[in-house]
């Protein structure tokens, strides 16, 4: 029979003990990088009249807090955020199970926890500890920026944002987009060095993948070669293991383009196949994005040879024309003219010819007809321009590489691999 002393643990509770051990402290970003980012954020918040930013998105929690997860926690069972304010060190507000990782991988030391596990005697809901945090920081009647804008990987629901607004009726809520993107578009020296290393690694990974393409193997075989190379280069923290994507198509009739990867990975590659690879592996949370076209055969068909040269020339001439001070729409216009220069019957194949890159594989600025963002030194961008077979038989060639914007032009960070259509003839 049960005694009346059963469940004392549940009745009396237990103190939440935060580990202070520093033996296995491995922060994702250096201390001076963290301090510099927060100092810059405070400067930009003051410029835009903002007292604090409340950050839920995956990439912003990493950028401003150094906190990175092994998975994306969309569910409210682990709701958490980073609060960056003018008058206080950054604060992590989150579920208790996350605290150990925060302490061991970030410089955040003001950690405020909640848990539905009642024995810990912590606040039972995120909203309870969040509102208490905002009030204790004297932000309850100030200007608070939330991630209302686009281009954020949100880990909070729309309803929860509305609940925050309701629970803090005296605060003024604005969009964090201006501060976040004004800062994140310009990469720090630490980021640039990381991305240089990342591009070298990615080049070795993708070259192995492309050189493995031959008749008789499956698309999955090529991807497996790439995945194994990820691990060999310590690029195993990819957000999505499919993010080197091979688009395959046949070449014997119009309408054979197949811009689908999963779940058709077991398709056997054959001579005459053509396609391209897009995107690239991630490294320490940062993205790569490259594009190359290929043809499986001993010799390019004449039309593919023309498309290879046209796409290459349009791309190189566009890259050579890009300078700081140009707007995104100006770069788009240059690329369009260079494409027409190669073949009057060509059209710009997508609605942009480049973009920024960093903790997301597509970031501001966009090189599109409607983007007036001015190109500045310190930005890391991708340029993607090409020419395509408008008969829908032959695909074409649209090279893409990553570049650092300098004071005078562009410095290539991308891979050392030909930008002609690659001939997969290793069989």
Image (spheres, grey):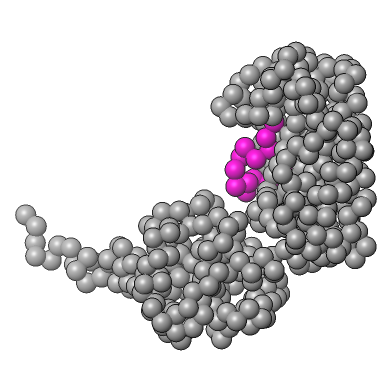
Q: Which quarter of the image is occupied by the N terminus?
A: bottom left
The residue that appears at 9% across and 65% down in the rendered structure is 4
Q: Which quarter of the image is occupied by the C terminus?
A: top right
Location of residue 48 with respect to 158 vertically, above or below:
below
Residue 265 image offset from top left, x and y in percent: 61, 25
Does 5 lie within the magenta span? no
Q: Along the line of sight, which residue is nearer the eye, 133 or 398?
A: 398
Q: Along the line of sight, which residue is nearer the eye, 193 or 336?
A: 336
Location of residue 75 with respect to 277 vertically, above or below:
below
Q: Dividing the picture into quarters, in which one does residue 119 lie?
A: bottom left
Residue 340 image offset from top left, x and y in percent: 88, 38
Residue 154 image offset from top left, x and y in percent: 51, 57
Q: Along the line of sight, which residue is nearer the eye, 152 or 6?
A: 152
Give the left or right position of residue 192, taking residue 282 as reference.
right
Q: Of all residues shown, which one is farthest toward the front?
A: 344
Give the left or right position of residue 338, taking residue 375 as reference.
right
Range covered by the magenta-colored residues: 233-246
Location of residue 374 with respect to 283 vertically, above or below:
below
């Amino acid at each position: 029979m049960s005694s009346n002393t059963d469940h004392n643990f549940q009745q009396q509770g237990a103190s939440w003990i935060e580990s202070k051990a520093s033996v296995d402290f491995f922060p994702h970003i250096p201390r001076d990088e963290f301090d510099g980012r927060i100092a810059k954020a405070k400067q930009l918040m003051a410029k835009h009249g903002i007292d604090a930013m409340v950050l839920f998105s995956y990439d912003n929690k990493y950028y401003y807090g150094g906190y990175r997860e092994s998975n994306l926690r969309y569910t409210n069972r682990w709701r958490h955020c980073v609060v960056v304010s003018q008058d206080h060190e950054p604060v992590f507000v989150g579920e208790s199970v996350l605290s150990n990782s925060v302490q061991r991988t970030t410089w955040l030391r003001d950690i405020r926890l909640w848990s539905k596990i009642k024995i810990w005697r912590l606040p039972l809901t995120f909203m309870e500890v969040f509102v208490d945090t905002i009030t204790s920081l004297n932000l309850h009647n100030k200007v608070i920026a939330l991630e209302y804008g686009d281009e954020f990987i949100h880990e909070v629901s729309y309803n929860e944002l509305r609940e925050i607004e309701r629970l803090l009726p005296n605060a003024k809520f604005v969009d964090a987009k201006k501060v976040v993107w004004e800062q994140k578009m310009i990469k720090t020296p630490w980021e640039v060095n990381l991305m240089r290393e990342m591009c070298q690694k990615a080049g070795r990974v993708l070259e192995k993948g492309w050189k493995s393409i031959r008749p008789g193997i499956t698309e999955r075989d090529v991807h497996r070669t790439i995945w194994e190379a990820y691990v060999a280069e310590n690029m195993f923290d990819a957000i999505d293991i499919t993010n080197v994507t091979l688009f395959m198509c046949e070449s014997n009739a119009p309408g054979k383009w197949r811009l689908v990867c999963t779940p058709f990975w077991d398709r056997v590659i054959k001579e005459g196949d053509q396609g391209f690879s897009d995107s690239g592996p991630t490294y320490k949370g940062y993205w790569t994005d490259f594009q190359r076209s290929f043809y499986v055969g001993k010799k390019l068909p004449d039309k593919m040879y023309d498309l290879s040269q046209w796409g290459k020339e349009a791309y190189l001439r566009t890259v050579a024309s890009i300078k700081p001070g140009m707007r995104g729409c100006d770069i788009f216009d240059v690329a369009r003219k260079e494409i027409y220069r190669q073949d009057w019957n060509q059209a710009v194949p997508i609605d942009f010819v480049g973009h920024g890159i960093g903790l997301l594989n597509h970031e501001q600025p966009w090189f599109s007809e409607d983007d007036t963002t001015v190109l500045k030194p310190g930005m890391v961008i991708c340029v993607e321009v090409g020419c395509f077979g408008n008969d829908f038989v032959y695909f074409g060639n649209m090279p893409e590489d990553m570049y650092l914007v300098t004071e005078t032009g562009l410095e290539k960070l991308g891979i050392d691999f030909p930008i002609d259509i690659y001939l997969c003839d290793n069989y």
